[in-house]
Image (tube, rainbow, N blue to C red):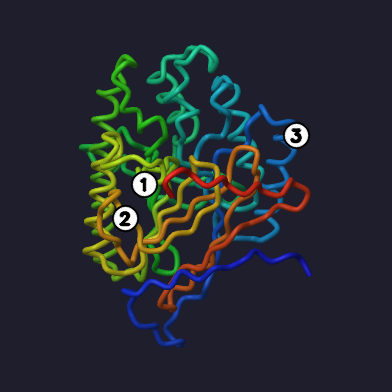
Amino acid sequence: MPPRPLLAVLALALAPAAVPAAEAPAPFTFAAFGCVPYARYAGSEEAFRRLLAEVDRHQPAFAVHLGDTLGGDERATDAFYLRRRADFNRLATPLVYTPGDNEWTDTHRPGAGGFDPLERLARLREIYFAEERSLGGRPLALLTQRRDPAHARFVEHARWTLGGVVFATLHVVGSHNNHQPTVPGALDEWRERDAAVVAWIRATFAAATEAAAPAVAFFFQADPFVADKNLPGYDPGFESCLRALEAGARAFGRPVLLVHADEHRYRLDEGMRFAAEGERVPNVTRLETFGSENVHGVLVTVDPASRAVFAAGPLIVPGNPLPRLPRAKAGR
């Protein structure tokens, strides 16, 4: 038999009672991965192809790439965007993509080509988000923020529903979410996108509440939790997003799963704190995937009829080096 991923049940105390079996939607799975491949590691492209093949082997309902499709020391050219899009389209599995900072935010750096980040962001939207559907061999229909006249520019914000569960992407990236005062145009871009992100979070929770969804899941690239970085208070680039997620999750009251990349380590935490000294929100679970030299993913089973809804664990790719254990951080 093929190897099965490890599963760790996310027991969320504030979940609703189980739906009667006769009415219950069938369980399904999804895969997520991010911050891969990075060309600085020998064999990274081959490892990435093995990851995509392993995703297809598990036949999930969909997969999500959480951004950073290249390393920060690589050139995010049009040719690269097209090559990576072709990689995604070779998947049989529907693939939803949300951008990372390496694709555009940090491309002004000399080692990354010295591009204009805003020009790269515009091309990214043209190449990856021209239509309201996912990538992959069996595209998934998506509802995007282009339908909102106030935020129509943000075509990368997508939402879809499966088994009654609501899923959404958020364009929230590393490098302080582009809150970079020394980079020309960065703060204006951040302000506009930050407002769109908050609007999309609120719209997603509103849609889930109206539909009596059993759970909600959000996907984004950055790790916005300052406690992970031993920082006090809020990072200004993430403050509005975190406040909107916390308020929405508390009001929603049912399981909320936040799936992200950025720190390149597998992590599964229940009852997240949205501020370093804040109170835990018991119905929110954070799932972080591998990345960088650890070319693996995560696999999540979704059972809309269960109290927990989500059960998650590592998706370890045969043939790729096993992931290294993260070092403990000072003060943790």
Viewer-side residue, 16 vs 130: 16
Q: Secondary structure at mark 3?
A: loop
| Image quadrant occupied by the N terminus | bottom right
Select label 1 or label 3 by which is in front. Answer: 1
Q: Is residue 95 left or right of residue 83?
A: left
Q: Are marks 2 and 1 in contact (CB under 8 Å)?
A: yes
Residue 43's disc is 3
Q: Amino acid at mark 2?
A: Arg
As drawn, 28 above or below 136 = below
As drawn, 61 above or below 223 = below
Residue picked out by circle 2: 273
x then y, percent, for residue 131: 44, 40
Q: Earlier in the sequence, mark 3 or mark 2?
A: 3
Residue sitting at the far front: 331
Calculate the distance from the C-alpha at mark 3 to the C-alpha at mark 2: 37 Å
Q: Is residue 202 left or right of residue 326?
A: left
Q: Residue at x 72, y 41 (%)?
A: 47
Viewer-side residue, 313 vs 100: 313
Q: Amino acid at mark 1?
A: Ala
x then y, percent, for residue 80: 60, 25
Residue picked out by circle 1: 227
x then y, percent, for residue 2: 76, 65
Q: Amino acid at mark 3?
A: Gly
Q: Earlier in the sequence, mark 2 or mark 1?
A: 1
Q: Residue at x 63, y 36 (%)?
A: 37
As drawn, 163 above or below 45 = below
